[in-house]
Image: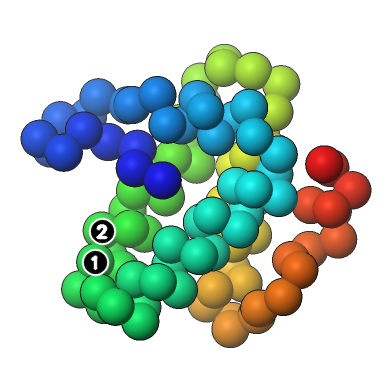
Amino acid sequence: MTMLADDGSDEILENVEDAIERSPLRVYRRTRSHLRFAWRHAPGALARLHRRFARDVAWLVLKPTGPDRVRAARAILAALRDYHVGRTGAGPAWIWRAR
């Protein structure tokens, strides 16, 4: 989930808004999958990915973009937490109820 323009500007791309429209489950799985893929294949990209996800969460919480923005932010944070503690599997129960 690329959130910032590749030229280094702070311009938020449409992908964040698209993420809001998706279910929290899809946001969670996509975030966790990106982290696991980077860990296996591009460990040097992990720090950059973490910064992007932090910016995404901040943007989702602070901008009035829709009713599902807080759930999307929570899904990203849950994926980050589960990645760091090594959890795999279905994800938190609240995500499945939120579908």
Q: What residue type is labelled 1?
A: Ala
Q: What residue type is labelled 2?
A: Arg
In-front residue for pair 29/4: 29
Q: Percent position (x, y) of residue 70?
A: 66, 34
- Visible in this render: residue 77? no
Q: What element carries label 2?
A: helix
- Position of 32 relative to 60 (above/below): below
Q: Residue at x 84, y 42 (%)?
A: 98
Q: What element carries label 1?
A: helix
- Visible in this render: residue 98? yes
Q: Percent position (x, y) of residue 8?
A: 13, 37
* Labels 2 and 1 touching (C-beta < 8 A): yes
Q: How crowded is mark 1: few (under 14 residues within 10 Å), some or many (20 or more)?
A: few
- Position of 43 relative to 77 (above/below): below
- Report which residue position mark 2 lands on: 48
Q: Residue at x 72, y 75 (%)?
A: 89
The numbered mark at residue 16 is none
Side of 8 relative to 15 (left or right): left
Corner quadrant of residue 46? bottom left
Q: Residues within 10 Å of mark 2 (few under 14, many from 20)?
A: few
- Report which residue position mark 1 lands on: 45
Q: Which residue is drawn at 29% across and 78% down?
A: 41
The quadrant in which the C terminus is found is top right
Q: Percent position (x, y) of residue 6?
A: 16, 38
- Position of 34 relative to 7 (above/below): below
Q: Percent position (x, y) of residue 87?
A: 65, 80
